[in-house]
Image (cartoon, helix red, strand yellow):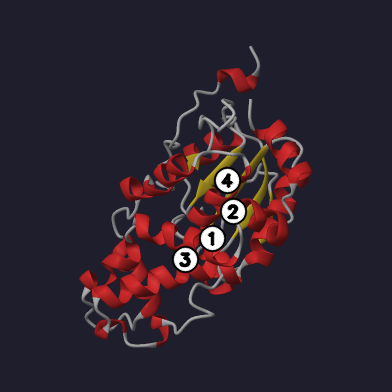
Amino acid sequence: MSVKEKIEFQRRLDLEGAPNIRDLGGYETLDGSTTRWGRIFRAGRLSSLTARDKAQLQQFNLRVICDFRREDEYLQDITDLGDFAEAAIHNLAISPGDHTRSIAMTDFNSVSGEQMFEWMVLINRELALKQTQTYRRMFELLLETEDGGFLFHCSAGKDRTGFAAALILSALDVPRDTIMEDYLLTAQYYPPKGELEYLASKYTDSSRDVDLSAYQALMDTREEYLSAAFSAIEEHYDSVDTYLSGELGIGKAERELLKHRYTE
């Protein structure tokens, strides 16, 4: 029996230090194929992996990691996959809110839940319309990864990562309803204990008392967020297919290669 056959595939990997790392295998496509297990993974930050976690990840022979975090984020939480990891880490920094009026530039204690919700909708539209070069590079790296595992992540594995997963699954012809189901799974695993406090510390003076309830919309995984990204695409392009081809370099030939490699 090969090493791959010994692996017990599951949607969410049972990792102690990374509660929101998931395998994108097992999703049925429009032509009746299924996305391959053990090849493409989505995750949050990878700085708190235990020795057991690192050993488990080694099973998947990770070759490429796309890190969507800003420099301050990855310097605060350095990725640590263990001494024997061979994955090449590519920093594809995305700063949500750069192209909109950023709530992060204001006093978070004065922001309402509704304002935060509206900001998150704008951020997800921005991911689709203003971060095309970043996601194009992600696809270039995916196409270059001929074997082994491919992983992409941000801090929470929620927004920047969620849209990346939606793009990859779209390119593999996974139905939109299934893509949304995958996106909303994050709500089951995020935030882990202590994450609310961690997030608050990123945006406020830690010496001040913070109303953590103000962060709920920021931390939530809501259907409206990903729907906003798809709506932005459909408002500016004929279709997601046109967007993938024209903006991200994923035309017919590239999609056929991806489906050959990542579906069965």
Q: Is residue 212 left or right of residue 3?
A: left
Callout 3 touching callout 1 (CB < 8 Å)? no
- Which residue is label 4 attached to? 170
Q: Tell me the distance, in whole angstroms, between the alpha carbons under discs 3 and 4.
A: 16 Å
User: Sequence order check: which comes first, mark 3 or mark 2?
Assistant: 3
Residue 195, by quadrant, is: bottom left
Q: Which amino acid, mark 3? A: Asn
Q: Is residue 64 above or below residue 30?
A: below
Residue 82 in sight from this viewpoint? no
> In this rendering, which labeled residue sits more in front, label 3 or label 1?
1
Q: Which amino acid, mark 1? A: Glu
For image coordinates 21% across by 70% down, the residue present is: 213
Q: Which amino acid, mark 4? A: Ser
Judging depth in this view, the residue of 262 and 150 nearest the camera is 262
Judging depth in this view, the residue of 9 and 127 nearest the camera is 127
- Which residue is label 3 attached to? 124
Q: Which amino acid, mark 2? A: Val
- Which residue is label 2 attached to? 240
